[in-house]
Amino acid sequence: MQELIPILGGAAFGAVAAGLPSRYMRPGFVLAFCLVVGATASLVSGEIGESPLFVLWDTTQCVLAFLATRIAVRLLAGRGVGRRGRHEMP
């Protein structure tokens, strides 16, 4: 259940990032956001008491969820989901 925090955090940021200016898409900003989410998830779940490496694991999950969501948003936006296709007759 605790794994939902970094996954949902990364996915939400990935979905919202489509409308943000390009300066927010820089790798440093994305990594910093995911590090904060990963550290928060490790702290909330209590995993950080066992090993600080859990922060790295949760951060990685956040980054992967962000990337997967960005790819999905770009693919869906490129296909024009919800709009008429180019080859359809009016």
Image (spheres, rainbow, N blue to C red):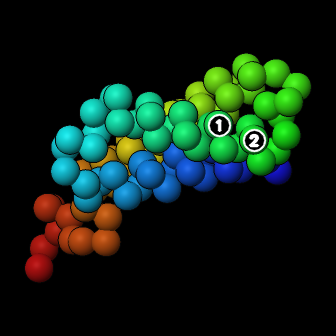
Rendered residue at 46%/41% (across/down): 33
Of 18 and 42, which appears nearest the observer?
42
**x and y percentages locating residue 41 in the rendered image:** 70, 44
Q: Is residue 2 left or right of residue 68?
A: right
Name the kind of residue labelled 1 in the image: Ala
Q: Residues within 10 Å of mark 1 (few under 14, many from 20)?
A: many
The answer to whether marks 2 and 1 mark residues whose Cβ atoms lie closer than 8 Å is: yes
State whether residue 73 is above or below residue 80. above
Q: Which residue is mark 1?
A: 39
Residue 74 seen anywhere in this rendered image of the structure: yes
Task: Give the CA separation, mark 2 to mark 1.
Answer: 6 Å
The answer to which quarter of the image holds residue 56 is: top right
Q: Is residue 3 left or right of residue 86?
A: right
Q: Secondary structure at mark 1?
A: helix
**x and y percentages locating residue 57 in the rendered image:** 68, 26
Q: Which residue is mark 2?
A: 43
